[in-house]
Amino acid sequence: MSRRMTAGAVAALVALAGCSGGSGGSRVRVTYSGSASTASASTASASSTPETTTSASSTSAGATESGDEAPDTREAIPGPEVEVAALSKAPTIDGDQREWEKVPAYSVQTQVGGKGSTKATSSWRLGWDENALYLFARAADPALTQTHVQRPWLIGTGDAIGLEIGTFRDRVSTTKLDARDTRILIAPNEVGGTLRAIAKAGGDDFDQGTTWTSGSAVAKRTASGWVVEAAIPWSDLGQKPKAGLTLAGQLLQADAVASGAKRGSLAALLSNNPQRRGSGLKWRFAWGQLTLQK
């Protein structure tokens, strides 16, 4: 099944899915899109990058042998850059921030989707080695709401963090997503434990997704919200890491409706990239940049 929808319709979907009786109903592909009144589509938030960043390198694509631009591509207009720190030792995936104190932090606080109001924010740190991409995210969100335990393809409409990542190109396709584009979703379970999902590019959008079982991840509640720590194998992302490599991508945080009839549906989607408007092909040219540091 390959049905898409706007973020404004997510609440109706989840309400319907909740009536289907556990995981036996049909799966529906979720597409975050639409605008948010607090987001700016043309400028990058100053809070999304630290004071010093490294200029992005890029992989040229979409050019013919004669040097002309290939048809069915458009120029990339990248969002903000995130430095991914080179780690001499892989962190222990246990939800403890102490190993991350020297790694630059990036704020995820610009609302780019959903029609509800939110006070949620998160702070991210990213690292890498030859084996994996690592992340540590601390969310400020005391009302933990995640109702999609049996539907991993929907955990991104509850309280969760998400990473969209793929190959960075100077010119991007206007006919399909890049084959390596990947979305990772990780969420805390209300009763303890960690929920996680992965979705891959499927034409002009991500596929419906499924449970992510490789790598490792942990989500824990805190006094003011929750934390997520994860190791994502490069093989899951289809990438070969090296210092200076720039990937396309953005950091996401979903905040769910915490009470009432729509509890568990998406209230707001936040990003470090103010240009982010949807995960599908239409907005692929505006993905941000993640550069692997030396």
Image (cartoon, grey):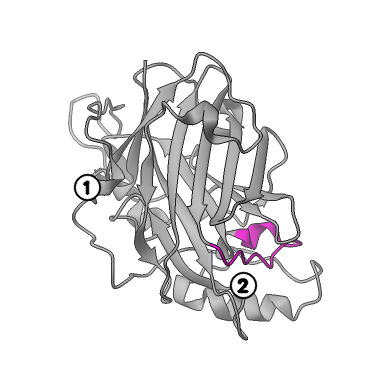
Depth order, front residue of 37/92: 92
Disc 2 is placed on an element classified as loop
Amino acid type assigned to the residue bearing label 2 in the image: Gly
Q: Quadrant of the N terminus?
A: bottom right
> At 22% across and 27% down in the image, what residue appears?
55
Disc 1 is placed on an element classified as helix
87 left or right of 38? right
Depicted 156 relative to depicted 175: above or below: below
Q: CA distance from mark 2 to mark 1?
A: 31 Å
Disc 1: which residue: 46
Depicted 148 relative to depicted 292: above or below: below
Segment colored magenta? 142-155
52 left or right of 9? left
Residue 212 is inside the magenta segment: no
Depth order, front residue of 78/223: 223
> At 38% across and 16% down in the image, what residue appears?
243
Disc 2: which residue: 264
Residue 256's x, y, as percent?
A: 55, 69
Say whether residue 104 is visible. yes
Say whether residue 177 is visible. no
Q: Quadrant of residue 207?
A: bottom right
Depicted 1 relative to depicted 182: above or below: below
Amino acid type assigned to the residue bearing label 1 in the image: Ala
